[in-house]
Image (cartoon, coloured by chain):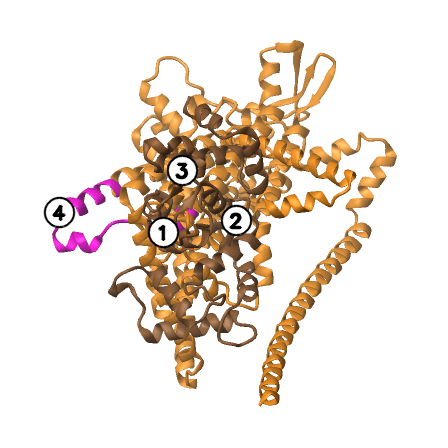
Chain colours: A orange, B brown
Amino acid sequence: RDSQQVDTEHLSRWEKWRRTSSKSLKKALSEVKGLSSYLVLWRQDIHSIEGKFGTGIQSYFSFLRFLVLLNFIIFILVFSFVTLPTVISKYGIFNSTIAYISPKFIEDICTIYKPSGNKGLVYFYTYLKDLLSGTGFLEVTSLFYGYYSIDAVWISIMRYNLPLAYLLATFAYLALSFLWIIKRSVEGFKHNLVHDADPFQSYCNKVFAGWDFCITDPHAARLKHRSLQYELQTDLQEEKLKQKIAERSMEEKLRIYSLRIFINIIVIAILSGCFYSIYKVTVFSQENSNNIDNANSQVNLLVQYLPSIVITLANFIGPLIFSFLIRFEDYTPAFEIKLTLLRCVFVRLANIGVLLFSLWSRISDCGSDKCKPFGYNYKLYPCWESDVGQEMYKLMIFDFIVILAVALFVDFPRKLLVAHCSCKLVQWFGHKEFEISDNVLEIIYGQTICWIGTFFSPLLPAIATIKYFIIFYVKKIVLIHTRKPAARPIRASSSNFFFLVVLLIGLLLAFIPLGVSIARIPSSKACGPFRNFNTSWEVIPDTILQFPTGLQQVLFGMASEAFAVPFFVILCIIMFYVIALARAHKRVVEQLREQLVLESRDKMFLIRKIAEAQR
Amino acid sequence: GAMGGSASLIPRDLLGEYQELTFLSKQEILLAYKRFSELLPKEERENAYSTRVPKSQILTLPELRANPFQHRICHVFSTSETRDDSMSFEDFLDMLSVFSDSATSDIKSHYAFRIFDFDDDGTLDRKDLEQLVNCLTGQGEESRLSSAEMEQLIQNILEESDIDKDGTINLSEFQHVVSRSPDFASSFKIVL
């Protein structure tokens, strides 16, 4: 306060005015910030979790909140550009009319699509079955692709091109997710790039920034002490282990490498087994659920859910086997964790890929003339996009049910058992730890399904939003009641970055099936906005052809090789420049450090000289 | 209500001054005032911002009671002439300001250095580091590291942060190593 007052006396009038105006601007900004902090979702809940369990677990819940917001925004985007115009025009509000597509093809075989909406007297049970599997009355609603068989919507005098809007909304939500994730991960990435030389979690970080000052609960503080002690001891042991590894003899190295290759072969074999079984089960499920004889029996529901069940089993058993096998591979503990996580991520995401691949192999199954002349199997799949949408819907619902069931039927009984029964076997089983990485992989798996499925089922993001909303409260309750934090605590900074990187991998993997569906597989002629086009992508070249010729030439020029190759080359040059800049900065930092060491030696030398001269 | 009542107890210009000199927003200052006056016995609550609260009372705050550095925090932020580590309201605001979200990392690392300097000699030497690690791992015999582990750990810390190799960490070395620590900003924070 005193120093500020002294300063103000020496300033001119202009400077004084500038200072007071910047102060009042800062005040105004802080008022706005204060108001807007009330709008942040779940601020109080996450704050209390941070206080009780530390920032590692809190980052999981912040991540969940981020996904809720992302899905909500995607839903608003898709709803306002695709569903809303359709619904408005179907009910004739605002003087709107629909121009239905008149199929260009004279052959009616492929345009027959009769989704069996429930007619007449049906059991109540059928509604439940339809809700769970997306067939029956749900199939004809705006939930699935088949509802949008519209060419254009006329609102008063404006023509709203629905097929184009549908495709562009898809690209928009993918681009939005991509940019938002990248923006959030920029912080963590900057740290990673600069600290490449140092070990990622150095001792200074652990000791000086180790204590979480947010912890208010004495019990949590005790747990934090124990986890810090464990972490420091593990790191010191790991360092000793690394020294031992560096001193390994030649034959030991050979033995270990051959063991690792062997185990990797086992892992690949297990993965292929998983993929093959998923493929077989999907084919079986598709064949048998199209059989109208047992359309109303309970077995049919089970058959429909078979792929989801097998995928969930594979997602559960895979990680168990991997964490068992990796013990034999003799890596350092940190690398063990990373490798197991990578394998689990791969299993989960590849399972979705195999499911989609098996669906497509059935859709494009063109042996013995089944799909002339349209390129897809129109007898079995008159509206294949809705079918794919139904599979994604089933996966999402089943995932949700499994998470709730595990929380209800595994976590709570386990806690009751451990608390009240003191026999040795049960105590060894112990309290469930809140494994952050498993939970994160679960929700990333769900989010990837949502991204892929939104093209085929535009209302899926709304279901995803509600699902994650409920999961937040379920997980919070499970956490508060089971209480034991993971023995290997994950730090806040690395966990944030890790979650976002895996989410980004999921998004990039989601691009592939969508790209194939949009550009390669012919769109169904019996339903959907793309009936008049060969593939869904064709809307865009079609629309461009309607632009003035000048603009057309520019756009075609941009898509040609003459433009793309130099553009790619320039991008590479920029990337190399930035990398070279980063390396140069690192070298400067090294040099400055060396200079500091020399300075201190000079200082010592001079002090010694002075001491000698004084004698 | 209660909030309006406490707001009238801090004169407006003082409130504005506190907002300028600290990193806290108006709500945070008012909340701090409310919590501070709750630590005082009822009779003294009127004059809350000119009385000093003894250290034993401060340590009953939930934000500090579980903190292993509670004594050091009180010692560093207390401006009491009698050196009894009692805190006035302005000391309390000072502490909250340094630990708030909007404080710069320079300020945070400066005060972190003073908190970790157990013998108040201006550098972090081996004894300070040993006490620091013992605070982190907890009180009690079984939660301390063995002397070989402690030796190895301190050796590693000094290797990473002692740039001029004099066996101690001074303020600029500390600030340098903490600026590259990704977790410091998120862990060195107390929000009421």
Between the residue at mark 1 and the residue at mark 3, the CA separation in whole angstroms equals 18 Å
**Main SS of residues in magenta:** helix
Q: Name the residue at 46% across, 70% down.
A: B157
- Residue tagged by mark 4? A421
Furthest residue to the front?
B82
Mark number displayed over residue A500: 2
Between the residue at mark 1 and the residue at mark 2, the CA separation in whole angstroms equals 31 Å
Between the residue at mark 4 and the residue at mark 3, the CA separation in whole angstroms equals 46 Å
Of the two numbered discs 4 and 1 in the rendering, the one whose residue sits closer to the viewer = 1
SS type, badge 4: loop
Q: Which of marks 3 and 1 precedes in the sequence?
A: 3
Q: Residue A584: horizontal and vertical position, in percent?
A: 69, 68
Q: Is residue A356 left or right of residue A291?
A: right
Q: Is residue A100 left or right of residue A267?
A: right
Between the residue at mark 2 and the residue at mark 3, the CA separation in whole angstroms equals 40 Å
Answer whether labels 1 and 3 touch (C-beta < 8 Å): no
Mark number displayed over residue B36: 3
Q: Chain of mark 2?
A: A
User: Which residues lie in the magenta part?
Assistant: A411-440
Q: Chain of mark 1?
A: B
Are the residues flagged by discs 2 and 3 from a single subunit? no
Three-letter code, disc 2: Leu
Three-letter code, disc 1: Asn
Answer whether labels 1 and 2 touch (C-beta < 8 Å): no
Are the residues flagged by discs 4 and 3 from a single subunit? no
User: Of residues B150 and A607, which is closer to you in this image?
Assistant: A607
Three-letter code, disc 4: Cys
The local crowd at label 3, few if under 14, some if 14 to 19, many if 20 or more residues have their Cα within 10 Å, is many
Mark number displayed over residue B67: 1
